[in-house]
Amino acid sequence: MSEITVLAVVGSLRSSSLNRELAEVAVANAPEGVRVEIAEGIAEVPFYNEDIDGETAPATAEALRQRIAAADALLLLAPPNNGTVSAVLKNVIDWGSRPYGASALSGKRVALAGVGHRLDTTLADAQRAVTIAGGEVPEGLVEEFPISGLDGKSPREHDAVAQRAGDLLERLVAPVR
């Protein structure tokens, strides 16, 4: 059996993002036979604009689309921004949803997770955007990591966070194995 690749996309550009730390926890706690890769360079992807998409789409956007298409599944880490999806994550979803009829997200299994306060609306909005774009977020693949549960520590310092991240990945890839 070949290795399963999960592309993790962090919806925050902040260097000390707790969601970035959660992505790193996922990398470190991936189940056997699963490789989690964090998508780098998403800050260089321009905001989606149909005028620049097509035969001459920006190289950064095309590279992102190709990585989404090549992955067996996605892990999207959604920090709450004013109670909804960050512009960074929404932009990744927008580029991944095109071109129309050939979405890199079409039929792709997606897990959603986030560290923050009031994650319910953020993750619900992210799930809506992903499913409209053609991705699949099956039941059991949305995981909240409230800041209040971290007791002022990093996600890296919690065995329970590591266990939950590994379990989420296992549920994500189970049908792909």
Image (tube, rainbow, N blue to C red):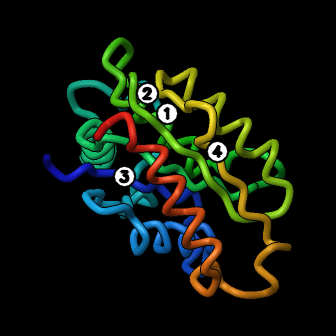
What label does residue 94 carry, if any?
1
Amino acid under label 2? Ser
From this view, report whether residue 81 is shown above or below residue 72. Answer: below
x, y percent for residue 82: 83, 52
Q: CA distance from mark 3 to mark 4?
A: 16 Å
Mark nearest the camera among 3 and 4 is 4
Q: Is residue 147 left or right of residue 98?
A: right
Which mark is first along the chain, 3 or 1? 3
Q: Which residue is mark 3?
A: 7
Q: Which residue is mark 4?
A: 142
Disc 1, disc 2: CB below 8 Å? yes
Dot 2 crowding, Cα within 10 Å, few <14, some 14–19, many 20+: many
Q: CA distance from mark 4 to mark 1?
A: 20 Å
Quadrant of residue 42 within the rendered picture? bottom left
What label does residue 66 carry, if any?
none
Amino acid under label 4? Val
Q: Is residue 21 left or right of residue 123?
A: left
